[in-house]
Image (cartoon, helix red, strand yellow):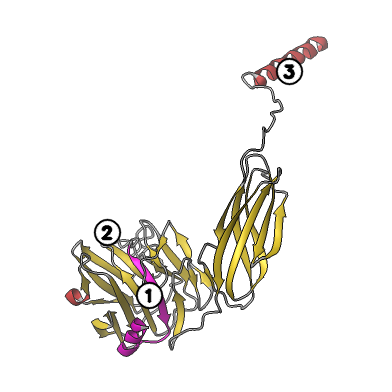
Amino acid sequence: MKILRHISAGALSILFAFACNEGIDPISHVEPGPDEAAPTITVSYPLEGTRVQVKEDVAPLDIQFEATDDIEIQQVAFSLDGTEVGTLSGFKDYRRAVETFTYESLTNGDHSLVVTVTDLSGKSTSTTVNFEKVPPYQPVFDGEIFYMPFDGDYMELVNIVTATKVGSPTFTDASVYGKAYAGAADAYLTVPTTAITTSEFSAAFWYNLNSAPDRSGILTIGPPDPNLPATPNNRKNGFRFFREGSPTNQTFKLNVGDGASDGWFDGGAAASLNPATSDWVHLAFTISDTEVVVYIDGEVVSQGAFAGVDWTGCDILSIASGAPRFTEWGHLSDQSLFDELRIFDKALTQEEVQAIMEY
C-alpha cells in the first residue's frame, strides 16, 4: 500500500506540472535589438513660465519628469542656469522613468532649467524650461489674509497652502492677470479654513460667467449636514455664494448662517447678468456683525442687516462649486473662469472694494 501511495503521489505531481504548463510557452531569452531611437524627456514641473512663490527666499525645487528609451536609460542630468546640479541613474524600469529630482537651493530670479536624458549607446535628448522664482508674497491690501492668483497652480500665497483639486479643472490665458482658473464639470478646489474664518469676512475676485450649467456654487464655506449627508443643505453656519437662472439671465445670491438660522441676500435684477453680453466682472461680498453687502463691479447689488456669521463645523472653503457641503439644490461645479481671489479679515468698504477692482 505504501508503494502504491508513492506511485499515486508521483503521478499526481506529473499531472499537476503538465496542467500548470499547458498553453504556456517556455521562457526564452529575447535579444533587445539595436538601439535605434533617441530617448525622450518630458518635464511636468516646473512648466514653461511657472512662477515659483513660497515663504522662503531660498527653497527646494522638485523637478518632475518622465524619461523613456527603446532599450535602456543610462542617466538623466539636470542643469540650472548653465551649471550641472545633479544626475539620476539606476532606474528600476530601465526603459521608462517617472521620477522627481530635488534641487535644494533655488533662489529668487529668472532661471533656465535643462534636463538631458542619455541612453546606453550615448544618444541624448534635452529639454529646456524657463521659469521664475519670485519673492515671497506680501499682502497688498489692509486685512488681506488669503490670495490665489491662479497663475498656473493652485497655491494660496499668504499662508502658502496648495488647494486640493477635485476633478479636472484647467487654466486659461484668457484672464485678467496672467492665467485664470477654468472650471469644468465635477471639478472644484478646497482649502482649509483655519486662517480665514474670522469674525468679519470679505471676499473679492474676478469672474467670467459661463451659464452652463444653469446653476452652480461659486464660493462655499459650510458645515456638514447630518440630516442630508448625500445632498447637504445645512445653512445655519458659514455662507454660500452661488448663481442660478437661465442661459439669458443669471442671478448671484448669498446665503449666510448665524448659528441659529440663515439670511438671504438676493439682489434680484440688480445682481443679475446676461451671459450673452457678460465678460469679466468683479464680484465681492462682505460680512460683518451688523450687515452683509454684495457688490458687482464695485456697485452695491444687495445689502441687509445681519448679526454676524457663525463658523461652527466650517472647516473647508470650496472654490467653483457648492460641493461637498451645499448640493441639495444642484449648486454643483461652476464652469466659469475665476481670477485674483482675495479674502480679508474685515468688512471692506465700497471704496476699498473699488480700489481692489482697479488694482
Q: Is the N terminus in the top left, top right, bottom left or bottom right quadrant?
A: top right
Could you tell me the amino acid type at mark 2?
Ala
Question: Label 2 near label 1: C-beta < 8 Å?
Answer: no
**Residue drawn 59% across and 66% down?**
112
Question: Type of residue at label 1?
Answer: Gly
**Residue 354, magenta (yes or no):** yes
Q: Which mark is residue 13?
A: 3
The crowding category of the residue bearing disc 3, from other C-alpha atoms within 10 Å (few below 14, some 14 to 19, many at least 20), is few
Quadrant of res 109: bottom right
Label 2 and label 3: CA atoms lie apart by: 67 Å
Magenta residues span 336-358
Frontmost of labels 2 and 3 is 2
x and y, in percent, of residue 222 in the image: 39, 70
Residue 44: give x, y in percent of width and height: 55, 57
**Disc on the earlier residue, 2 or 3:** 3
Residue in the image at 34% along x and 81% along y: 357
Q: Name the residue under label 2.
A: 212
In this image, 252 relative to 176: left or right?
A: left
Quick one: 227 or 110, which is closer to the camera?
110
Q: Is residue 165 magenta?
A: no
The residue carrying mark 1 is: 238
Query: Residue visible at 63% across and 57% down?
Result: 115
Q: Which of 305 and 136 is in front in this view?
A: 136
